Image (cartoon, grey):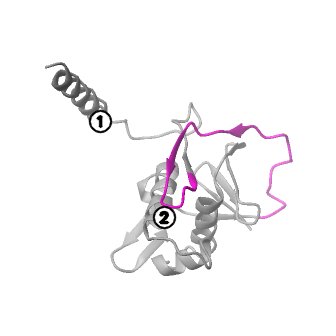
Amino acid sequence: MKFRFSHFEFDCEALVLTNNGKVFSLNEKPAKLLALLLTNAEHIHSKDEILEAVWPGREVTNQVVFQSIGHLRALFGDDAIKTFSRKGYQWQLPLTEVTDDEAPPATSPQVETPKQTANNDNNEDLSIPSAPEDNIATDTPKPAWPLAAATLLGLLAGAYFFI
């Protein structure tokens, strides 16, 4: 089953994410979580349900769910997945199911490889993509305060060590 949302298309069986024809490298666990959220988008998925579907039979902490949700939000925006307090998570972006008739002709896609990674408790690699260049049109400007705050903290730390 394939779904289209925003500029993305996701194949839930092959666990392949594309953006405007470019294949994004998405690790297995976040891809399985995305498949779960998309295939039953009207349902609120509890943490236990997610753990059982994505990490079946494994003893992992709830932190892996939080990290995977955070990874998907970093890819698709904070509005893509809604958190329901004490209930779970639900997909929010409008979906269109893609039939084989609508699928674009097979070409040799380019793989978009993320540059940053974050590790969870089980040392599973949750890749976080770098900022896309001209792939995604965004209506919201990027705030400058995180860069200013990081710069200020760096200066303060440097001054602390030199004094």
Residue at the spot 51% in from the left edge and 60% down from the top edge: 68
Circle 1: element type = helix
x and y percent of residue 89 in the render? 45, 72
Circle 2: element type = helix
Residue 133: in magenta span: no
**Mark 2 crowd level (few <14, some 14–19, many ≥20, 10 Å Cα):** many
Residue 74 numbered tag: none
Magenta stretch bounds: 99-125
The residue wearing badge 2 is 64
Vertical relation: 85 (above or below) 102: below
x and y percent of residue 10 in the render? 68, 58
Residue 146 numbered tag: 1
x and y percent of residue 30 in the render? 58, 60
Residue at the spot 67% in from the left edge and 43% down from the top edge: 20
140 to the left or right of 98: left
Vertical relation: 87 (above or below) 160: below
x and y percent of residue 52 in the render? 57, 79
Disc count in the image? 2
Foreground of the two, 112 or 153 = 153
Q: Amino acid at mark 2?
A: Val
Q: Amino acid at mark 1?
A: Pro
Is residue 42 in sight in this rendering?
no
